[in-house]
Amino acid sequence: MNLSRIARAAGCCGVTRIVCAGRVKLDAKIARDAAQTLKLESHNSLVPVLKKLKAEGYTRVGLEQTTNSSDLHQYAFDRRTVLVIGNERQGLTEDVLAELDAVVEIPVWGMPYSYNVATATVMAMYEYCRQFPDG
């Protein structure tokens, strides 16, 4: 369900491609129009994909709480950014974190200590769109 919610919001943000590790399935009722317009890719591992995207000139930004992560609201995205999100429970793995150019987090003031992955992803995509309002 989270992936379908992310896909729907991604469509609103003009995202055309989502790359996932493992099996993927969209619920068309939740993803709505994005289910037909997004290119959804599935790979065994994100690491080779992240290396390729770096070679293509993308900045790879993880969404995760780490000791070195930056506040999302203070982070200046590059135009060619790939947002990397992790599993709802485990977050980003160490091998994926090692490939990233930056890591951002969303401040949380209450319990639990983090937002749901779909909610956090939408917040990060919105911040990117806010910084690049011309699309």
Image (cartoon, rainbow, N blue to C red):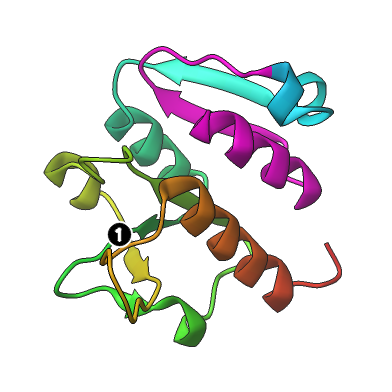
Observer-nearest of 126 and 18: 126
Residue 132 on image: x %, y %? 74, 72
Q: Disc 1 marks which amino acid?
A: Glu
The residue located at (35%, 70%) in the rendering is 105
Q: Name the residue at the front extreme.
A: 111
Residue under label 1, please give it.
64
Looking at the rendered image, the quarter that the C terminus falls into is bottom right
Q: Would you say residue 112 is visible in this rendering?
A: yes
Q: Would you say residue 58 is visible in this rendering?
A: no
Residue 91 on image: x %, y %? 25, 46
Observer-nearest of 113 and 125: 113
**Numbered label tally:** 1
Residue 58 on image: x %, y %? 51, 53
> Is 21 drawn above or below residue 64 in the view shown?
above
The residue located at (81%, 26%) in the rendering is 37
| Left or right position of 35 against 17 | right
The residue located at (75%, 52%) in the rendering is 13
> Is 75 drawn above or below residue 91 in the view shown?
below
Residue 122 on image: x %, y %? 59, 55
The residue located at (29%, 23%) in the rendering is 45
Q: Name the residue at the bottom extreme.
A: 74
Secondary structure beneath disc 1?
A: loop
Residue 62: name its quadrant: bottom left
| Left or right position of 123 against 105 | right
Q: Is residue 83 magenta?
A: no
10 Å crowding of disc 1: few (<14), some (14-19), many (20+): many
Residue 113: name its quadrant: bottom left
Q: Which residues are magenta?
A: 1-27
